Image (tube, grey):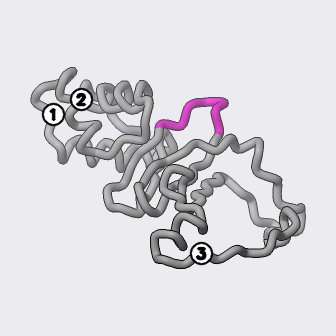
């Protein structure tokens, strides 16, 4: 980990990111930081975010629709992310709900230092049931029911 000077601007970025109730992008973080440090530039915010990610204080989340988002790594609140490919919504997934890999999954001597999973998919809000999609296209198809987990 690189030791970085703790400036007022850096502290403001950390404060804003830690308090965020969402997964903000750099522009949102910049607008919030300017309320605390009116002279801070967007470039300073980007450089600070890069340093925080490099130092493991924050993680990036790649949205399908564009802007990279950031998440503060709260101690004891390990989680991963699910990202909707259509609307870009980001959902937290509790890390404890993800099964652990078996002992032989990694090459002998490999030491895992960090885990970051991003699940990409379509959120319930964007998901269009097959029947609604077929009706909008003028045809209705009934698919046979399958046992849970068969897909």
* Image point (25%, 24%), residue name: 8
* Label 2, residues with CA under 10 Å away: few <14, some 14-19, many ≥20: many
Residue occupying the point 18% across, 47% down: 43
Residue to which mark 1 is pinned: 40
Select label 3 or label 1 by which is in front: 3
Q: Quadrant of residue 4?
A: top left
> Would you place residue 116 above or below residue 9 in this image?
below
Label 2 secondary element:
helix
Task: Identify the residue position indicated by label 2 in the image.
Answer: 33
Q: Mark 1 or 2, which is nearer the eye?
A: 2
Q: Could you tell me if the residues under marks 1 and 2 are in contact, i.e. CB atoms within 8 Å?
A: yes
Q: Earlier in the sequence, mark 3 or mark 1?
A: 1
Q: Please name the residue shown 85% across and 62% down the image.
A: 148
- Closer to the chain start, of discs 1 and 2, is 2
Residue 23 at what x, y percent from top left?
Answer: 42, 41
Whether the magenta-drawn stretch holds residue 74 is answered as: yes
Q: What secondary structure predominates along the stretch shown in magenta?
A: loop
Q: Is residue 118 magenta?
A: no
Residue neighbourhood size for the residue with mark 3, other residues' Cα within 10 Å, grouped as few (<14), some (14–19), many (≥20): few
Identify the image quadrant of residue 32.
top left
- Mark 3 → mark 2, Cα distance in angstroms: 52 Å
Q: Secondary structure at mark 3?
A: loop
Instruction: Specify few, some or many for label 1: CA neighbours under 10 Å numbering under 14, 14-19, or 20 or more.
Output: some
Tell me where residue 94 sits by quadrant.
top right
Q: Which residue is mark 3?
A: 140
Residue situated furthest top in the rendering: 36
Residue 22 visible in the snapshot: yes
Span shown in magenta: 72-78
């Amino acid at each position: 980990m690189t030791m970085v000077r703790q400036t007022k601007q850096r502290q403001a970025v950390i404060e804003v990111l830690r308090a965020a109730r969402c997964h903000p992008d750099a522009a949102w973080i910049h607008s919030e930081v300017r309320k605390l440090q009116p002279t801070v530039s967007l470039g300073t915010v980007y450089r600070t975010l890069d340093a925080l990610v490099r130092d493991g204080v924050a993680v990036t989340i790649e949205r399908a629709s564009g802007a990279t988002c950031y998440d503060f790594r709260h101690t004891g609140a390990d989680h991963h992310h699910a990202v909707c490919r259509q609307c870009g919504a980001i959902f937290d997934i509790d890390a404890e709900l993800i099964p652990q890999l078996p002992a032989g999954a990694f090459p002998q001597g490999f030491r895992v230092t960090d885990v970051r999973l991003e699940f990409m998919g379509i959120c319930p809000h964007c998901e269009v049931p097959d029947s609604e999609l077929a009706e909008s296209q003028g045809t209705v198809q009934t698919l046979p029911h399958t046992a849970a987990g068969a897909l």
